Amino acid sequence: MRTIRGLVVAGLMGFSAVSGATAQTGSAMVSAQAPAGLLGTSLANETQAALNRGLDWLVAQQKPDGSWSNPDFPALTGLALWALARSGEPGRKPATDRAVQYILSCVQTNGGIYRNVPGRKGGGLSNYNTAICMTALHATRDPALTKYVLNARAFIAGGQHFGDDDYKGGFGYDRDTGRAYTDLLNTFYAAEAMAQTAGAEDSRSKTEKRVDINWAETVKFIERMQNKPESGDENSGGFYYNPSDPKGGATTNAQGVVVFRSYGSITYAGMLALIYANVGRDDTRVKSAMDWAVKHWTLEENPGMGADGLYFFYNILSRSLAASGRDAIPRPDKTLVNWREELAKKLIKLQTPVDPKTGHAYWVNSTGRYWENDPVLVTAYSLLALESLQ
């Protein structure tokens, strides 16, 4: 399978250089069967089996029109398609082809990939749906889809906000809301989509202008969503959602200033967005985000949010750490955690019992915030997380 990261960084050098942690052997928290950053043979086989159960469950849930879950939001189909495309399994190609055709049925004349949902706040979530769907289409590696990806790139670039305010440089759910409102989640998805599909620009004719977002302004927006040292030890380096809506709540720092709390999933999203923007891993912004992540390391909850958004947290943690080249997480007692191994075990444990009739299994969050009571969405998140471990 293809991964964001490409080659595995050998040993523990990658993380130690940033954290200052000393690589140690003999820790019970690091697999005795494989070096940090790798899965032992037995766990790799278990992971692949969990992937196959989940992918086959997804295929069985696909609707006749090629969609999954709520058809008004093609991103739900896009996430499932992305997981199937990354699996590279020929036997699942019919489901992939049906999903592609459904997503193409949602393409608008302006290049966006969404459906209009009258009366709903944010309408059809046009930027969100387009970013995920164009990434999924690109992941199929079908040259016939390049024209749709190029048009979607233009749509996304046109949704970047350039007002003279704290939202400048970011992206929101819907560019046609008529109000300044951008957030780090949508900015992450836009950055990911534009970075992942950048190679498609080579297909434009020489007379056609290349399309991209203003990466410098994107980075400035991301940086504004990062808590600085004066926010206090619990928040410094982490990220929050947007300038007016903290999602993770607020607190008051030592100087009596209200500070938006950092939380896990958005911190990993902010860090990965910086990586997509070619901000180096030794940059203070990336290092401080990693420091916050290390300080709050856990797989028992989405730090700062509990069970809310837990599976998106697993998804973005996996892809962010894989892209950053970090193979181990240092703990206060100087032990090192092989995060791939720990996450694989966690997701295998959380998968529902295997259906004896079909051999299928899936994931779902009993906490419904952020749509995570939808097993299609949560299964897609989990599959993408596991695929990033390989």
Image (cartoon, grey):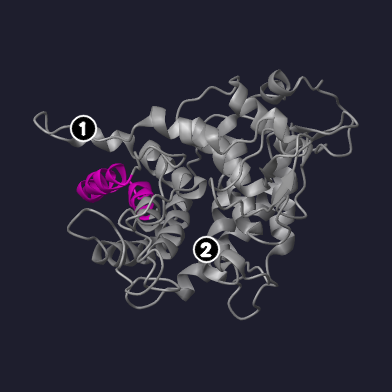
How far apart are labels 1 and 2 at the CA level?
36 Å
Residue at disc 1, secondary structure: loop
Q: Quadrant of residue 205?
A: top left
Q: Quadrant of residue 327?
A: top right
- Classed neighbour count for the residue bearing mark 2: other residues with Cα under 10 Å, few (<14), some (14–19), many (≥20): many
By secondary structure, the bulk of the magenta-drawn segment is best described as helix
Residue 210 numbered tag: 1
Furthest-bottom residue in this view? 357
Residue 372 numbered tag: none
318 in relation to 80, above or below: above
Residue 305 visible in the picture? yes
Residue at screen point 68% across, 53% down:
249
Q: Nearer the viewer, mark 1 or mark 2?
A: 1
* Residue 128 x %, y %: 40, 55
Indicate whether residue 88 is drawn in magenta. Answer: no
267 in relation to 71, above or below: above
Residue 55 numbered tag: 2
Span colored in magenta? 133-159
Residue type at the position of mark 2: Leu
